[in-house]
Image (cartoon, grey):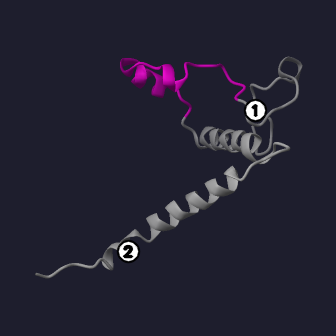
Amino acid sequence: MGFGDYPAEYNPKIHGVYDPARYYGKPDTPLSQVKLNELGAWIGRRNKTPSAIAGACSRAWWRWQHKYMQPRRSTMAPYFQLIVGSMIFFYAINYGKITAHRNYKYH
């Protein structure tokens, strides 16, 4: 599987038109339905290669795109999500500078 190819599990005769937000592999139990004593086995069944992680991030991106950015009547929600995400990111990278400028009472 090279960069930009379809997933190996995708078969156009079975699945129809390709959807980048869909996982075409063998379905497994969703995380929300896993019991605590089964959590280790569930994590062990995950594919932890860099290409699998990149594929999961790509599917998440496309699910977000299909839900918020690409509908005909989109709302302001994706823009607010971007603003709040940027605020959290810049707060995290500047946290050391922010804590150095605290006002203390010396009495």
Q: Nearer the viewer, residue 56 or 99?
A: 99
- The amino acid marked with disc number 1 is Pro
Left-right relation of 104 to 12: left
Query: What range of the chain is rendered magenta?
Result: 23-47
- Residue at 27% x, 79% y is 103
* Tag 2 residue: 98
* Tag 1 residue: 7
Label 2 close to label 1 by CB (< 8 Å): no
Residue 69 is situated, as x and y percent measured from the top left of the image, at 76, 48
- Relative to 18, residue 95 above or below: below
Q: Nearer the viewer, residue 55 or 101?
A: 101
Residue 66 is situated, as x and y percent measured from the top left of the image, at 76, 40
The answer to which image quadrant residue 95 occupies is: bottom left
Q: Is residue 74 magenta?
A: no
Give the residue furthest to the left: 107
Mark 2 nearby-residue class (10 Å; few <14, some 14–19, many ≥20) = few
Numbered disc 1: secondary structure: loop
Q: Is residue 25 magenta?
A: yes
Mark 1 nearby-residue class (10 Å; few <14, some 14–19, many ≥20) = some
